[in-house]
């Protein structure tokens, strides 16, 4: 197990290198570098000398492989550089926005799980019944409902029409207000964006849970338990459900990338200053250092997520050989 | 115009009596009696994105410029009809046939940190601006030969040639000379706490959230009545409008799609005052004259004639647009009201295309000339659904004329690069206009003077007129010159001038003394927002938070 872990961690390095190299090259061929330099100079129509001077500063006259290695070296020291736009250190912008996006997405995921897992389990127990079919249909309808439309409707109803929730932003109270009030204010601001993010994933999380629990319910040990006279409720929740948790955990590992970048629409509509919005805006502005930094962070977290999922899987089910991992179980 | 304490005190007492008797409702009634200005309340305005920095020297984005207008002062500014009004310069005079401009500065003005304002600050601002490494727009002072300060409150500007831009160029925010050691670097050094002499002091900039300003009690025109201004960052325009409805902000543009709904209701008009004005923006299509299709002015005219601009504005914009005949905005002093925009005339367009040699070979298919089909690509930039609509409309109209048009969407940086390289056939874009109508940068054939002349338009008479207009100090003569310029713009049609969008803005009705200008936003003129106040019983926000 330890050997497997070690090898997995080592394999992160070439994957990461590959991702960064591809991103770096893509940004190279993307048109618009002149505009990025103009932005960096801060002037409207910068002179030739200003642009040349900036090219020197950012080493843009050197060949691509050298630039890539220089950037890698700085990365090893976690020197993510400065934004071309406002010259603030990228790590600072990253820290603030990552925390906000993670908060939003983790809450949304928790909410979605809290609703869909019990539902999916109940439906597995009554698989094929009217409740099961109608319930699934309703969730699929929700899934099909576009995110921006939901956001606009929720905003209109709760903030404009009824005025019970704030429309946008992170907070409405100053930083000097008492902690309790600030926490409630933050919760009020989180409610609508979290709802918007959560409702779309209810369908597949519920179906996934249902499928896993159903598989458990059809297995031999459940038959044996029924034969022993164990109560059906206990069978569903203590036996089938517990075993269904294992593939759930691996699914969560795969959801990590979405946690960071999947909320850009909601972030824009609700003026939530998070990573998704930062990624989109810095790409539009050709703010290369920020785009590269965000890509690295997302890649790292994604790899960490999948590693975590594999490890948890092995821990949860001791029968599984470490090499099989995720694929061994569901094949 | 200082606060008249006793009057306000009595009024406040009376108002408080009334407050107890009223039930709190979302609708506010306008007070029937004339009230006198009182201090208090805050104005919350949404902005689309974080300004990259609050360095007033290198400001190029709209939000930094907006904040600069309230935190810093310039020597002169624009009044309600776009005329020049004194700000930090209390008076000025021209001499030596317009070659010498002398400003007399206000006395006893202090920077927000207490230091006195003197002519040294003006000199310092000038020197930093023309310094090419500072990143500022050095070219705006290009006609200036020398700036000197014979004493603390006089500034002399000597010009190489007399220019009508003499006063315009001094509408820039002034920088404090006594802080010069701290900001010695280039644009890279962005001050985290900008200092000015302006009516509002900078409090904080919370990235992603808001910029907060508070009233400057020592402002030379008197403390503004409002306690503060807050610029809240709300990226989505639809959210901005909803924030207005929810009461979280006090100001919003009304999206064209919403215009016939909520804003048409009496309840809305009670809560908000609405202003309409042609925005200082012009949508246009540029035809690259280096491409064989568009080197002939007849073809360019035909393109404009084929587009039903007024119809488009009516349908897609609910009338929120004014068709344009040239680059001169209805608010410009040299605007020629006699010149009508080209009409929608597809038959004439067809005739012009035939004349230019592009003939239809059959009733279907595209026009051809010398074996070449008339098919081109229009570049538009992404993120603006209105551009897509105009482009589709054009494609449709041109298709009926036998001209093929493909649409290519690029994001802004990529588009700009293509324009720089002149690598395009036609482009749909827009210009931000200023109160100075000089269109040299887009129409002059010289690569430096006409740096934004992407379409490679070249007309020696136009070149001559543009330079003459720049250096002409006599208003009447200048107007004549620009009349001829507008004539040439219409004849040559290097660009198809589409329309000036009409901006519709809603402001909370509780703000009094807001002067509407037919040509500009109520926020723009000086002193403008400094005069706004909210009667005590209507006040909503207690100071900037």
Image (spheres, coloured by chain):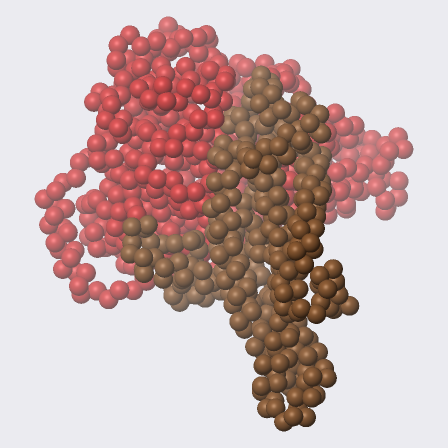
In the figure, B340 relative to B534: above or below? above
Seen at 52% across and 63% down, the residue is A108
In the figure, B504 relative to A56: above or below? below
Q: Examine the rendering and report whether any part of residue B497 can be seen.
A: no
Report the quarter where the N terminus of chain A lies.
bottom right
Q: Position of residue B262 (x, y in %)?
A: 45, 60
Left or right: A309 as drawn, with respect to B363: left
> Which residue is outermost to the top?
B96
Q: Which one is nearer the viewer's eye here, A284 or B221?
A: A284
Q: Position of residue A288 (x, y in %)?
A: 60, 35
Seen at 64% across and 74% down, the residue is A244
Left or right: A8 as drawn, with respect to B545: right
Q: Which one is nearer the viewer's eye here, B539 or B264?
A: B539
> Which residue is outermost to the front?
A2
Q: Position of residue A104 (x, y in %)?
A: 50, 57
Q: Position of residue B235 (x, y in %)?
A: 49, 48
In the figure, B497 relative to B448: above or below? below
Tell me the shade of chain B: red
Seen at 27% across and 21% down, the residue is B117
Seen at 10% across and 50% down, the residue is B10
Left or right: A154 as drawn, with respect to B83: right
Q: Examine the rendering and report whether any part of residue B97 can be seen.
A: yes
Rendering quarter of residue A120: bottom right
Report the quarter where the C terminus of chain A lies.
bottom right
Rendering quarter of residue A287: top right
Q: Which one is nearer the viewer's eye here, B314 or B216?
A: B216
- How many numbered badges does the structure rendering display? 0
Q: Which chain is brown?
A: A
């Amino acid at each position: 197990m330890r050997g497997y872990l070690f090898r997995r961690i080592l394999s992160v390095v070439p994957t990461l290198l590959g991702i960064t190299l591809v991103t770096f090259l893509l940004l190279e061929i993307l048109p618009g570098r002149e505009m990025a330099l103009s932005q960096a100079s801060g002037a409207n129509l910068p002179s030739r000398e200003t642009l040349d001077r900036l090219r020197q500063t950012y080493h843009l006259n050197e060949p691509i492989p050298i630039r890539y290695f220089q950037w890698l070296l700085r990365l090893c020291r976690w020197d993510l550089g400065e934004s071309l736009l406002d010259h603030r250190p990228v790590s600072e912008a990253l820290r603030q926005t990552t925390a906000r996006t993670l908060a939003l997405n983790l809450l949304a995921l928790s909410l979605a799980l809290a609703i869909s897992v019990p539902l999916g389990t109940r439906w597995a127990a009554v698989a094929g019944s009217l409740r099961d079919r109608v319930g699934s249909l309703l969730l699929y309808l929700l899934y099909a409902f576009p995110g921006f439309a939901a956001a606009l409707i929720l905003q209109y109803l709760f903030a404009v029409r009824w005025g019970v929730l704030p429309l946008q932003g992170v907070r409405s109270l100053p930083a000097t207000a008492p902690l309790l009030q600030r926490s409630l204010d933050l919760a009020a601001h989180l409610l609508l964006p979290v709802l918007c993010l959560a409702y779309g994933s209810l369908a597949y999380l519920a179906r996934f849970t249902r499928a896993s629990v159903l598989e458990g319910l059809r297995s031999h040990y459940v038959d044996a338990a029924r034969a022993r006279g164990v109560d059906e409720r206990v069978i569903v929740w203590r036996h089938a459900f517990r075993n269904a948790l294992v593939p759930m955990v691996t699914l969560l590992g795969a959801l990590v990338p979405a946690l960071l970048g999947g909320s850009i629409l909601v972030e824009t509509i609700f003026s939530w200053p998070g990573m998704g919005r930062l990624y989109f805006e810095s790409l539009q502005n050709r703010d290369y250092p920020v785009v590269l930094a965000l890509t690295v962070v997302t890649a790292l977290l994604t790899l960490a997520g999948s590693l975590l999922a594999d490890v948890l899987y092995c821990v949860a089910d001791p029968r599984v050989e470490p090499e099989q991992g995720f694929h061994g179980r569901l094949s | 115009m200082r606060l008249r304490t006793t009057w306000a005190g009595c009024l406040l007492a009376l108002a408080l009596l009334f407050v107890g008797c009223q039930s709190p409702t979302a609708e506010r009634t306008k007070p029937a009696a004339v009230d006198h200005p009182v201090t208090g309340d805050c104005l919350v305005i949404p902005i689309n994105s974080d300004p990259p920095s609050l360095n007033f020297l290198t400001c190029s984005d709209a939000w930094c410029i907006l904040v600069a207008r309230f935190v810093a002062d310039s020597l002169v500014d624009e009044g309600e009809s776009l005329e020049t009004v004194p700000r930090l310069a209390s008076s000025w005079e021209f001499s030596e046939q317009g070659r010498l401009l002398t400003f007399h500065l206000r006395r006893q003005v202090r920077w927000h940190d207490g230091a006195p304002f003197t002519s040294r600050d003006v000199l310092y601002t000038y020197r930093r601006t023309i310094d090419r490494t500072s990143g500022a727009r050095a070219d705006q002072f290009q006609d200036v030969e020398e700036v000197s300060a014979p004493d603390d409150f006089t500034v002399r500007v000597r010009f190489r040639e007399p220019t009508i831009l003499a006063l315009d160029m001094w509408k820039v925010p002034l920088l404090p000379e006594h802080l010069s050691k701290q900001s010695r670097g280039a644009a890279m050094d962005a001050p985290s706490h900008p200092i000015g002499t302006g009516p509002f002091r900078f409090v904080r900039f919370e990235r992603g959230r808001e910029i907060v300003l508070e009233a400057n009690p020592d402002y030379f025109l008197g403390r503004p009545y409002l306690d503060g201004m807050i610029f809240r960052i709300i990226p989505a325009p639809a959210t901005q409008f909803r924030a207005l409805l929810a009461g979280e902000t006090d100001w919003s543009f009304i999206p064209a799609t919403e215009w016939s709904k909520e804003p048409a209701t009496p309840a809305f008009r009670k809560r908000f005052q609405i202003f309409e004005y042609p925005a200082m923006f012009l949508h246009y299509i540029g035809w690259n004259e280096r491409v064989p299709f568009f080197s002939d002015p007849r073809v360019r005219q035909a393109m404009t004639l084929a587009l039903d601009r007024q119809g488009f504005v009516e349908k897609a914009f609910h009338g929120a647009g004014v068709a344009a005949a040239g680059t001169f905005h209805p608010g410009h002093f040299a605007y020629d009201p006699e010149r009508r925009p080209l009409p929608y005339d597809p038959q004439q367009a067809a005739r012009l295309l035939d004349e230019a040699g592009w003939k239809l070979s059959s009733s279907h298919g595209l026009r051809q000339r010398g074996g070449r089909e008339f098919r081109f690509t229009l570049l538009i930039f992404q993120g603006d659904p209105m551009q897509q609509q105009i482009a589709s409309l054009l494609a449709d109209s041109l298709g009926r004329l036998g001209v093929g048009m493909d649409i290519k969407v690029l994001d802004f940086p990529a588009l700009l690069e293509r324009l720089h390289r002149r690598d395009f056939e036609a482009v749909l874009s827009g210009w931000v206009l200023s109160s100075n109508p000089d269109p040299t940068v887009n129409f002059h054939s010289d690569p430096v003077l006409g740096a934004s002349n992407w379409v490679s338009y070249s007309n020696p008479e136009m070149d001559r007129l543009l330079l003459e207009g720049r250096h002409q100090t006599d208003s009447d003569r200048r107007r004549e010159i620009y009349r001829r310029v507008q004539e040439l713009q219409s004849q040559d049609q290097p660009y198809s001038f589409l329309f000036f969008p009409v901006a519709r803005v809603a402001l909370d009705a509780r703000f009094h003394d807001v002067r509407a200008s037919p040509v500009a936003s109520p926020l723009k003129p000086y002193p403008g927002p400094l005069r706004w106040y909210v009667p005590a019983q209507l006040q909503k926000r207690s100071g900037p938070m």
